[in-house]
């Protein structure tokens, strides 16, 4: 394990004191967070201030969830928490304690691409791939609720996710294509 | 050359599954064991003397390993940046961390290394810096005034270079022309803003003497060479690893001081050190682009034919020179393409490059061609309105003839294109005549539709000759690709052209598959590690299809020649009597006599093989292409709400001709993405500073990316005029949407606002700016 945030819990009362500033905020007591991620029980150490995105990426090693802004503006870090579309850079790891989290790593069936992922490849809905995990998670949430969206619905739903490469044309086509494929296969929103 | 099977086909990208499954690794997904984490303290002031820095309290924080200032790095050589082949240029120097003063908001003044990033950022708050404020120079024209405060005192003034050019006798033509027109345009700062920002990991291994640098770049070998020089290390001791890159768009063809500082921190601490920029750092302190203040003039005949062009380009270079390209990359490229699509031989320009107290100017897709295109095309629409000629018609009247070689006034040798054809096709596809009817009908209802056209010529494949045409003469480029056929007939392609979203693992494989007549699936493209791939300067300037594709074709051609000899030997035939097709080497005229490519490959390694053949089935070849140019025409249709100033982009259409298309899927994606960036640059992405130099766009609540709701479904259509001069006929593309797009959108808005007499002279055009244009236009009408 690398020496990342939250991996060195410090017992209360032993926190070093910096002259003039008191207790260093970085070492406020860390605790264990237990949750389910992509169906598996996982646990890890988080400080109260550890972001869910950092916890998933650096504590659990799920680096498919990306951090593009830490301002809740780009959507790269989108995950589902108990089925709700959530920006993991605006959530704390401790808030996900006891929750079920779904990330991009949970979308494919083993090494077989999910129809939504297949549609992204078919329609060239990705270039550099950095926004892609957030796009896929957001699109899944849309298709679960709205199996037959219009183009405008797709655009509005994805308006919280920035893509700097594609101009969105391929992404919108991909989501519409996936919706069609999922309806035909009888597993809408799967 | 065997018959094309893959080149030209809409081959799905082989890189996609890893990205789609979250399995690709970007820089921040890599954390070597023992890694420490860095955070930079950045200046809150635009221009200030550094009186003192006290890091002592930061060092006391538990988990902090180092707090480093400019004084600690004072013995490290500075970045030294110039264009040595241009005597007009001064030489800029930049310390890795400043000692004397800060020159823009966001400039790094100290760096903390700690156990994790959270602690490193906590420690930044404990550093005390005393500044003495200096007058900030925020306006590029004011920066050139003789009494302007100096940003780099040692240079004597704020101008990096003044460059003049003249061909023919434009002043004489202007003096006697029936009409002359002038336009001022201040193209606003914008930002490449790749979704993945910059990031660096340094691992300085004192025991082995090897230094490994992971960095998110478009130019791994150039980073290696520049850092080796910086560190005084033999180049083969440095290894640059470039993982998946979350977008570059030209920004990452700069060497940044952070890329030098982080490995030095690793040297000091004997631990890997990682820094990943946050969004504020990206916006305030990576690089801004395309801000050029322009004045362009055209002299015309009575019938609207262009007789001469003159241009003045003042490129706001910001506080430091982009290393190694300098701040000329915007204004000089803008000036060099002043004639672009138009047949005008009397042309002059002046380029100036002031330093200001803003974020340094760096390359961004289309560099200054974007800004220059906007000024020229906006001027041409003014001329069309004044002379009562349709904007499409006036451009067709002045276009360079289709299909023929053409030498421009600024020295570019065009290799033939579909200039007028692309424009006619674009007008036809968009339904230009019907749009004009609809526009007139809507105006009667008080609705303002606008149509903007923007044809252009795009350099394809930046290398020695094209660089010279753009004002950067006298540099050679070495760009190579390695092709190896393995014993089982599969092929490994090693490419130093670093993809950052363009899909090289697919497109280079398509090119090589056709050359070797092997299945696409049998090819694997390796990139991203200077230890694993041969030298190339990288991926920028729409160059990889032309330069990389050409080098790959040549290397594969060498391997093919050996395969033919091996096959002939197996067939007991003369090499002249065999041919390669459909995965087989066959005796010509006797197709039943054949061996597979796989059998020939095995023979190279294990025999039987000719005694006089070097059996190594591997070749590394370079390609330094002749000049080649793509062309395209963009059409934008917008509707402006005169009450709110909101602009809705209804349609964006491109007809592009990049010669032989390797993969239309990828080409469409490049055009579409670049056009979305054009929407952003014109309508949303301002990077304002106030007059004191405070930066007003430090978050994504201020710098607005266009989102899926702001970009229309982009329409892309292709013409294909293969280059007669390059390998494969490739012309290169990728930047064009952002070269031609902004001008099309600006002209569409100007067209929509024509009833108000509005004159557009700057970007961005946010709703407040559009309302101001409407009000000012009205005032002008009342005054006249």
Image (cartoon, coloured by chain):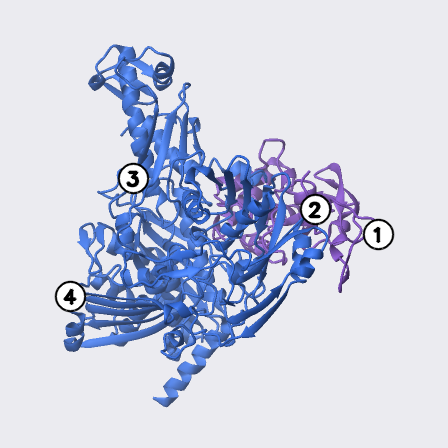
Observer-nearest residue: B637 or A66? A66
Comes first in the chain, label 4 or label 3? 4
- How far apart are the two marked residues, 2 and 1, measured between alpha carbons? 22 Å
Q: Position of residue B316 (x, y in %)?
A: 40, 67
Q: Are marks 1 and 4 on the same chain?
A: no
- How far apart are the two marked residues, 3 and 2, measured between alpha carbons? 46 Å
Observer-nearest residue: B95 or B549? B95
Residue B690 placement, left or right of B342: right
Q: Position of residue B616 (x, y in %)?
A: 34, 21
Tell me the residue that label 2 is attached to: A55
Please state the chain letter of the residue tagged with numbered disc 3 in the rendered image: B
Q: Position of residue A6 (x, y in %)?
A: 73, 47
Image point (59%, 36%), residue name = A114
Against B573, residue B661 (above or below) is: below
Q: Secondary structure at mark 4?
A: loop
- How far apart are the two marked residues, 2 and 4, measured between alpha carbons? 65 Å
Whether residue A89 is visible, yes or no, is no
Chain in purple (letter): A
Observer-nearest residue: A130 or B495? B495
Say the numbered circle drawn on residue A12. 1
| Neighbourhood count class around disc 3 (C-alpha, 10 Å): few under 14, some 14–19, many 20 upward | many
Tell me the residue that label 3 is attached to: B623
Tell me the residue that label 4 is attached to: B168
């Amino acid at each position: 394990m690398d020496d990342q945030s939250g991996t060195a819990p410090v017992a209360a009362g032993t926190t070093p004191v910096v002259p003039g500033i008191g207790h260093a905020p970085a070492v406020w007591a860390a605790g264990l967070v237990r949750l389910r991620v992509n169906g598996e029980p996982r646990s890890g150490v988080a400080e109260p201030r550890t972001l869910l995105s950092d916890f998933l990426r650096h504590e659990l090693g799920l680096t498919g969830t990306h951090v593009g802004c830490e301002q809740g503006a780009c959507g790269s870090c989108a995950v589902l928490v108990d089925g709700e579309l959530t920006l993991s850079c605006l959530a704390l790891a401790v808030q996900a304690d006891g929750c079920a989290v779904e990330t991009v790593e949970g979308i494919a069936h083993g090494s077989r691409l999910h129809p939504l992922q297949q549609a992204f490849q078919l329609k060239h809905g990705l270039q550099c791939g950095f926004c892609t995990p957030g796009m896929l998670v957001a699109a899944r949430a849309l298709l679960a609720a709205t199996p037959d969206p219009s183009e405008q619905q797709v655009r509005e739903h994805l308006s919280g996710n920035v893509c700097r490469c594609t101009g969105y044309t391929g992404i919108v086509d991909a989501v519409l294509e996936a919706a069609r494929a999922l309806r035909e296969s009888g597993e809408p929103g799967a | 050359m065997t018959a094309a099977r893959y080149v030209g086909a809409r081959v799905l990208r082989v890189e996609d599954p890893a990205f789609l499954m979250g399995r690709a690794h970007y820089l921040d997904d890599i954390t070597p064991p023992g890694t420490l984490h860095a955070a930079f303290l950045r200046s809150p002031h635009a221009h200030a003397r550094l009186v003192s820095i006290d890091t002592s309290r930061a060092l006391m924080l538990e988990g902090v390993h180092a707090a480093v200032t400019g004084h600690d790095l004072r013995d490290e050589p500075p970045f030294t940046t110039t264009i040595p082949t241009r005597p007009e240029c001064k030489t800029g120097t930049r310390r890795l961390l400043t000692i004397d003063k800060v020159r823009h908001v966001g400039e790094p003044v100290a760096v903390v290394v700690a156990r994790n990033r959270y602690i490193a950022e906590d420690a930044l708050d404990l550093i005390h810096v005393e500044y003495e404020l200096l007058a900030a120079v925020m306006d590029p024209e004011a920066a050139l005034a003789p009494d302007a405060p100096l940003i780099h005192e040692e240079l004597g003034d704020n101008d990096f270079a003044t460059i003049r050019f003249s061909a023919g006798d434009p002043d004489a033509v202007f003096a006697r022309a029936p009409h002359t027109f002038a336009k001022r345009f201040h193209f606003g700062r914008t930002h490449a803003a790749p979704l993945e920002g910059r990031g660096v990991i340094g691992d300085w291994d004192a025991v082995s003497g090897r230094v490994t640098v992971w960095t998110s770049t478009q130019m791994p070998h150039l980073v290696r060479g520049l850092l080796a020089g910086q560190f005084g290390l033999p180049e083969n001791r440095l290894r640059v690893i470039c993982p998946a890159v979350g977008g570059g768009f030209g920004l990452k063809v700069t060497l940044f001081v952070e890329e030098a500082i982080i490995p030095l921190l690793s040297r000091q601490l004997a631990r890997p050190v990682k820094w990943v920029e946050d969004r504020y750092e990206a916006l305030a302190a990576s690089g801004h682009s395309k801000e050029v203040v322009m004045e362009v003039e055209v002299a015309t005949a009575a019938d609207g034919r262009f007789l001469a062009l003159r241009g003045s380009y003042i490129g706001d270079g910001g506080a430091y020179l982009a290393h190694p390209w300098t701040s000329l990359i915007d204004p000089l490229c803008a000036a060099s393409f002043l004639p672009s699509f138009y047949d005008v031989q009397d042309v002059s320009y002046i380029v100036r490059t002031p330093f200001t107290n803003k974020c340094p100017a760096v390359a961004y897709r289309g560099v200054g061609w974007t800004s220059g295109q906007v000024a020229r095309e906006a001027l041409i629409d003014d001329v069309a309105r004044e002379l009562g000629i349709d904007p499409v018609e006036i451009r067709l009247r002045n276009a360079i003839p289709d299909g023929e070689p053409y030498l421009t006034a600024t020295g570019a040798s065009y290799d033939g294109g579909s200039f007028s054809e692309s424009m006619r096709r674009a007008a036809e596809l968009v339904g230009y005549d019907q749009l004009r009817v609809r526009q007139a009908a809507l105006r009667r209802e008080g609705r303002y539709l606008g149509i903007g056209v923007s044809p252009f010529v795009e350099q394809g494949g930046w290398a020695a000759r094209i660089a010279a045409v753009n004002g950067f003469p006298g540099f050679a480029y070495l760009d190579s690709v390695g092709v190896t056929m393995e014993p089982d007939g599969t092929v490994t392609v090693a490419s130093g052209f670093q993809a950052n979203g363009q899909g090289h693992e697919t497109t280079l494989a398509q090119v090589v598959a056709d050359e070797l007549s092997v299945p696409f699936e049998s090819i694997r493209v390796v990139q991203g590690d200077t230890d694993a791939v041969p030298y190339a300067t990288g991926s920028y300037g729409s160059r990889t299809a032309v330069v990389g594709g050409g080098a790959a074709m040549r290397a594969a051609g060498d391997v093919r020649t050996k395969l033919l000899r091996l096959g002939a030997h197996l067939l007991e035939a003369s090499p002249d009597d065999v041919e390669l097709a459909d995965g087989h080497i066959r005796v010509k005229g006797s197709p039943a006599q054949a061996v597979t490519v796989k059998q020939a490959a095995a023979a190279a390694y294990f025999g039987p093989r000719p005694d006089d053949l070097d059996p190594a089935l591997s070749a590394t070849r370079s390609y330094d292409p002749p000049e080649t140019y793509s062309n395209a025409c963009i059409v934008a249709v917008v509707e402006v709400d005169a009450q709110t100033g909101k602009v809705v982009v209804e349609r964006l259409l491109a007809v592009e001709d990049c010669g032989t298309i390797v993969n239309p899927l990828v080409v469409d994606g490049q055009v579409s993405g670049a056009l979305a960036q054009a929407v952003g640059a014109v309508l949303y992405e301002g990077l304002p500073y106030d007059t004191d130099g405070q930066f007003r766009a430090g978050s994504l609540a201020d710098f607005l990316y266009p989102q899926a709701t702001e970009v229309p479904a982009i329409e892309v259509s292709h013409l294909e005029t293969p280059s007669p001069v390059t390998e494969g006929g490739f012309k290169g593309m990728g930047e064009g949407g952002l070269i031609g797009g902004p001008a099309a959108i600006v002209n569409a808005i100007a067209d929509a606002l024509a009833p108000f007499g509005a004159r557009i002279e700057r970007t961005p055009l946010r709703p407040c700016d559009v309302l101001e244009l409407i009000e000012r236009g009205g005032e002008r009408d009342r005054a006249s």
